[in-house]
Image (spheres, rainbow, N blue to C red):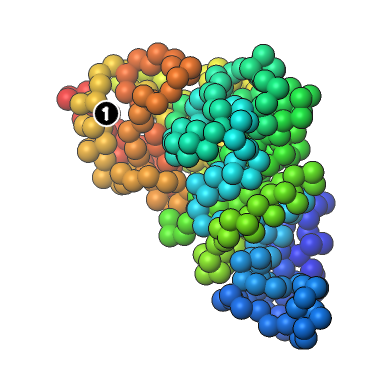
Amino acid sequence: MAKDGEHFSGGMGINTRLAHSGNNPHDYFGFVNPPVVHASTVLFRDAASMAARTQKYTYGTRGTPTTDALAHAIDALEGSAGTILVPSGLAAVTVPLLAFVSAGDHLLIVDTVYHPTRNFADTMLKRLGVEVEYYAPHVGAGIAALIKPNTKVVFTESPASNTFEVQDIPAIAKAAHAVGAIVMMDNTWATPLYFRPLDHGVDISIHAATKYPAGHSDVLLGTVSANESCWTHLYESFCTLGCCAGPDDVYQVLRGLRSMGVRLEHHQRSTLAIASWLEGQKGVARVLHPALPSHPDHALWKRDFSGSSGIFSIVLAGGGQKQQHAFLDALQIFGLGYSWGGYESLAVPVWLGDRVVAKAPYEGPLIRLQIGLEDVDDLKADISRGLAAAAAA
């Protein structure tokens, strides 16, 4: 017998919760998927209810049955008090930052952050009078020395974009909370299946649902989930900004969410097989994947994470952009394209020129690989073509 999705928020396996969370089919005549509600205007029964806004839905920007279904499903995964849905992963970064920092505030951001996050901080936030400072990913509890009286937010991302350093999130959260600062985390790499930020002291969890939740490289969406203390302010700011996601995209992500567990298992299995194999390949100086025992942050990753996803980087053994481009141009299965989390494998050149404190030396150029759902042997053969081309360049 079908049950209300909220009954699946805990105590059951992750794939069971993914399959059933978010909505009650009997609210919609037994149909297992919620309706796609296209809404702007919502009618009120009478003038009194309109004046008091006492009914559940009042206008399309403030939620519909479609957005509620996905938001409730995400809450069940995150353990959050509430979730907002925004049009892109970048919007999932910018909306909470706009909500919680003001002119004169100090914002700490990990130096290995997603570049568009840095760009937003260095342009719009600085123009609005926010003091932005970047910290090294391995700072841990030492972040206390960087916190100022006006520090309002510590923005984390772990593992790091492109170089995959793992942060000590509980230690950072403890130091931030000691002075009343809130902690935000971009958790797109792990998803709430493999790391639940709020369980580790994070106040606001951010995801580019474009990636693994959607899973098919055809939808843009972001989710922002908050704990009880931050939820009301986040939601009010979201309503003020009017930055809401469209119903068709929301529905596509909810549909993708149902299979995310089995897809992630496949991504993880294939990626670990390829990353381990790459450690023994000529022309590869290092493999930057925290789930590998060779990674310097492996113990920290193992302490906090329950799994790994399908994206990591390799460092070529010498050379420069010429060898990097030769590797990429030789690929036949891997596509050259941004984003990740879809069914197809992708490769991109890594550029680290924007960093200010996390400038570790590397033996050669970096290449980021997204391992899709293709057969592992085929992907190994394609990577071998790239390595041979780089060596010959």
Disc 1: which residue: 324
Disc 1 residue type? Answer: Gln
Residue 276 locus on image (x, y percent) = 47, 28
Residue 270 seen from this side: yes
- Residue placed most toward the observer, 280 or 77: 77
Left or right: residue 345 versus residue 198 is left
User: Farthest residue toward the bottom?
Assistant: 46
Q: Quadrant of the N terminus?
A: bottom right
Q: Quadrant of the C terminus?
A: top left
Residue 148 locus on image (x, y percent) = 67, 20
Residue 292 seen from this side: no
User: Farthest residue toward the left?
Assistant: 393
Residue 124 locus on image (x, y percent) = 47, 39
Left or right: residue 241 versus residue 384 is right
Residue in the picture at 20% in, 26% down: 322
- Residue placed most toward the observer, 362 or 317: 362
- Residue placed most toward the observer, 237 or 74: 237
- Residue placed most toward the observer, 2 or 142: 142
Name above or below for residue 19 compared with residue 352: below
Residue 334 locus on image (x, y percent) = 33, 44
Left or right: residue 206 versus residue 359 is right
Residue in the picture at 30% in, 44% down: 336
Quadrant of res 26: bottom right
Name above or below for residue 333 compared with residue 127: below
Q: How many marks?
A: 1
> Judging from the image, what secondary structure is the residue with disc 1 in?
helix
Name above or below for residue 313 compared with residue 242: above
Residue in the picture at 32% in, 33% down: 349
Quadrant of res 180: top right
Please tell me how crowded label 1 is: few (under 14), some (14-19), or many (20+) other residues with Cα within 10 Å.
Answer: many
Residue in the picture at 77% in, 76% down: 51
